[in-house]
């Protein structure tokens, strides 16, 4: 009887094993889709609050997957955790994720002797969350073009660099490193060189000695070639003339302010004819400012797709050099001695002003700042740019962008508008919103992880936990190391200079 029971049990076990063997392929087949759905990335940022800059909202409990230089997935943390695996996980709980910041007005220059000191500024941008900069020309155009290529290829560390190359100017200008033009043929040749040889990202045109008719010709020709233009508008022209000719961005807020003068055309004509000097022209422009005139002009800017880069903080610094002591600025530790020397020109000019001139420049910066919310109301794209670099005293690369957007809020923009000026306006101007300015699949993995919500307080852009640039994660320790390395270089240069 025992042998019969054992045999029966063995038969049942064999049958069970046979059934399991027969069912195994089906079980594995049914599980296969779940295993196949498991995707892989390089980095996942979990439990983070994503800031939708365009919508001025936040979405909590998100995860963001990066693969190489791309964002490949964004969604609810649980869903991403189920479907994705990554080699590195960044904990984003209690943190806010924004697109990388753009500084749309920087300068490199001061001559060949200052190349190394200029180059040392590049990590300062990254350490401050700035993943793209727009170089608006100096006197190191060829060097900057070389840096652009080296950064793009990974041979040089720094933010994405977009540049105008050498600026277009008139004959014998005060600015060095320019392409001097005295005829329409010269302008055409300059545009050909910049677009074909240098393959610049845009063209910068300034008004130091450039004849007004050539300024307009340069704008029209660049527009015909499909090249974006940025510039300073000659006093002998109205802002409207430059807008009609096709200027793409107006640099510095005071030019946009001039468009609000009721009699701007008459003032421009009097200046062009030599009947008034620049000081009198500025006095009349200020006296003639009218809100209705300004709003009509700004709505025209918006209709024509013209952006404005205020560089408000740089102007504020210069306006108040008589009042503010910068000798203890922390930013000085990051500026080499030769670059600091270039500050002297503006400092000395400001020091020569009498009480009336000082009062006038104080009034001017405060008056000009009032148009910032007007531009926003009219729908004009406002691009955050610092004007940081050589010559521009105490306007510190990297750090200055946070000063700029904080000043935007102080002067009437919302934190959301200020944040958009530093994350979306730049990509929009370059026609690259398909790649930058938002956190969603297909966008560039250029991101900044913040400790606080910038939609509540724009100063939160300073509270950086990590910067992701082209998919590479630089945590707080790495950012601090960048800053320390630049400080050490500057300290060494200072010591060498002291021995001479």
Image (cartoon, grey):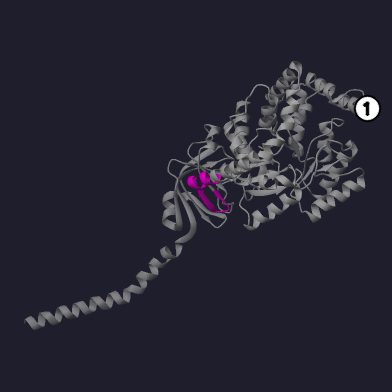
Q: Which element is circle 1 on?
A: loop
Residue ID at (59%, 35%): 331
Is residue 478 rendered magenta in the image? yes
Q: Magenta segment, which residues?
A: 468-482
Q: Nearer the viewer, residue 304 or 92?
A: 92
Q: Is residue 424 visible?
A: no
Left or right, 398 with respect to 281, comes to: left
* Corner quadrant of residue 306: top right
The quadrant the N terminus occupies is bottom left
Q: Where residue 188 sits in the image (x, y, percent)?
A: 88, 49
Residue bearing mark 1: 273
Q: Nearer the viewer, residue 326 or 53?
A: 326
Q: Residues within 10 Å of mark 1 (few under 14, many from 20)?
A: few
Left or right, 111 with respect to 411, comes to: right
Q: Where residue 230 sits in the image (x, y, percent)?
A: 77, 41
Residue reaching furthest to the front:
499
Q: Is residue 29 above or below residue 397?
A: below
Is residue 152 rendered magenta in the image? no
Q: Nearer the viewer, residue 367 or 427?
A: 367
* Corner quadrant of residue 315: top right
Q: Is residue 73 visible?
A: yes
Say how many tags the image has: 1
Q: Where residue 465 sits in the image (x, y, percent)?
A: 49, 43
Q: Where residue 194 sits in the image (x, y, percent)?
A: 80, 51
């Amino acid at each position: 009887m025992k042998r019969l029971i054992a045999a029966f049990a063995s038969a049942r076990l064999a049958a069970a094993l046979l059934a399991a063997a027969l069912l195994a392929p089906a079980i594995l087949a049914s599980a296969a889709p779940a295993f196949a759905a498991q995707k892989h990335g390089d980095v996942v940022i979990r439990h983070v609050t994503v800031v939708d800059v365009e919508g001025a909202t936040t979405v909590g409990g998100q995860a963001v997957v990066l693969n190489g230089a791309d964002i490949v997935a964004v969604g609810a943390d649980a869903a991403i955790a189920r479907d994705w695996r990554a080699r590195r996980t960044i904990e984003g709980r209690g943190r806010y994720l924004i697109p990388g910041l753009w500084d749309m007005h920087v300068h490199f220059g001061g001559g060949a002797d200052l190349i190394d000191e200029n180059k040392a500024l590049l990590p300062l941008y990254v350490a401050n969350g700035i993943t793209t900069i727009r170089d608006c020309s100096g006197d190191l155009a060829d060097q900057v073009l070389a840096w652009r290529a080296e950064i793009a290829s990974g041979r040089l560390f720094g933010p994405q660099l977009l540049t105008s190359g050498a600026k277009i100017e008139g004959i014998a200008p005060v600015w060095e490193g320019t392409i001097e033009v005295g005829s329409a043929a010269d302008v055409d040749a300059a545009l050909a060189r910049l677009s074909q040889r240098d393959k610049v990202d845009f063209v910068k045109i300034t008004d130091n000695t450039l004849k007004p008719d050539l300024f307009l010709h340069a704008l029209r020709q660049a527009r015909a070639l499909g090249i974006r233009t940025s510039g300073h508008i000659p006093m002998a022209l109205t802002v409207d003339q430059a807008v009609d000719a096709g200027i793409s961005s107006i640099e510095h807020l005071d030019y946009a302010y001039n468009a609000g003068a009721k009699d701007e055309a008459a003032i421009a004509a009097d200046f062009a004819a030599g009947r008034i000097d620049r000081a009198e022209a500025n006095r009349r422009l200020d006296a003639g400012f009218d809100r209705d005139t300004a709003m009509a002009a700004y709505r025209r800017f918006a209709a024509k797709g013209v952006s404005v880069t205020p560089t408000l903080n740089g102007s504020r610094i210069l306006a108040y050099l008589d009042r503010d002591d910068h000798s203890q600025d922390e930013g000085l530790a990051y500026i080499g001695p030769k670059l600091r020397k270039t500050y002297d020109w503006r400092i000395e000019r400001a020091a020569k002003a009498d009480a009336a001139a000082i009062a006038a420049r104080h009034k001017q910066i405060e008056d000009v700042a009032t148009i910032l919310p007007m531009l926003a109301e009219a729908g004009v794209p406002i691009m955050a740019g610092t004007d940081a670099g050589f010559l521009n005293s105490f306007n510190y690369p990297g750090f200055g962008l946070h000063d700029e957007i904080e000043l935007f809020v102080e002067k009437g923009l919302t934190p959301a508008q200020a944040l958009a000026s530093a994350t979306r306006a730049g990509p929009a101007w370059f026609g690259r919103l398909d790649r930058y300015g938002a956190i969603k699949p297909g966008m560039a993995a250029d991101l900044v992880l913040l400790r606080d919500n910038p939609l509540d307080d724009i100063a939160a852009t300073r509270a950086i936990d990590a910067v992701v640039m082209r998919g590479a994660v630089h945590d707080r320790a790495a950012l601090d190391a960048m800053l320390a390395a630049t400080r050490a270089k500057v300290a060494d240069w200072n010591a060498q200079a002291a021995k001479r």
